[in-house]
Amino acid sequence: MNKLMDAADLEGLTAHVEQLTAIRTLLETQKVYADHLSDYWGRLWEYSFLIEVAGASKAMCVLDVGGTGTIFSYYLCLRGCQVWTVDIAEYKVMQADFVARQFPQFSGIKNLWVDGQDLSVFQDGTFDRVFSVCVIEHLSSRTAQAKMMREMVRVLVTGGILGLTYDVLFEPLRGQTPWSANEMGPFANPEEVHQFLIQPLAGQAVIHGNNDLFHPAKEPRERQPDTYGSIGSLFLRKVSNG
């Protein structure tokens, strides 16, 4: 079994999924559910995988880049984290603030209308953990991806962990995905992840726990591949301010 999966044990993952499901039920009951909450079955395990491997415990200061208003941010809050989210979509920020007004338990989350490529609203070394769930492949250029990676690592404390997931699409299927013309799209091989996400950090961060960058952030039961590919995961630990 992959070392990363050893860390993310079935019992721990299942406990996270159960609590995430309870949050989804709460939001649906109160009719504040929205499509962008991204709470389908596989995504709940993806969130759980990130938490189990990177860790996100009480009193940690955590940033979710591009996940404003998702169940992931609400769960981080309930775990006792100090949660900030940033998103380029203003409507997501507005809806997340609306949810916070309806549910006092989420009122501590701070949601900002900010582009993940420019996190200058935060000082260096602000966060213990930074997460980004399937956002990086939607950026418009490799330059933009590198810029966002550097910003996410910059705002981490030394020793802090960045956990992110991304769409994976093996080369034979590359031309079949209905991806937007202004998005980079899924990664075709681990070499691309190294070249465009890791190398731009210039020794500021090292891979945390997993060298298989196409390792799927999936539920323990065997999951059938998505129509156009799967989900890869990357964990980086900050070692230097550069």
Image (cartoon, helix red, strand yellow):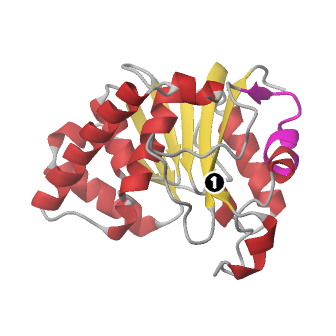
As helix, strand or loop, the secondary structure at mark 1 comes to strand
Residue at point 70%, 42% (across, down): 151
Residue at point 38%, 26% (across, down): 12
Q: Please say whether residue 196 is one of the residues in the magenta stretch.
A: yes
Q: Is residue 158 visible?
A: yes
Q: Position of residue 81 (x, y in %)?
A: 37, 27
Callout 1: few (<14), some (14-19), or many (20+) C-alpha neighbours within 10 Å? many
Q: Position of residue 225 (x, y in %)?
A: 56, 61
- Front residue of this view, candidates 156 and 15: 15
Which amino acid type is marked by label 1? Tyr
Residue 148 left/right relative to 218: right
- Front residue of this view, candidates 133 and 7: 7
Q: Please say whether residue 135 is one of the residues in the magenta stretch.
A: no
Q: Specify the quadrant of the image occupied by residue 198.
A: top right
Q: Position of residue 214 (x, y in %)?
A: 70, 47
Residue at point 67%, 51% (across, down): 118
Q: Position of residue 47 (x, y in %)?
A: 44, 43
Residue wearing tag 1? 166
Residue 37 left/right relative to 185: left
Start and end of the magenta stretch? Answer: 195-207
Picture quarter with the N terminus = top right
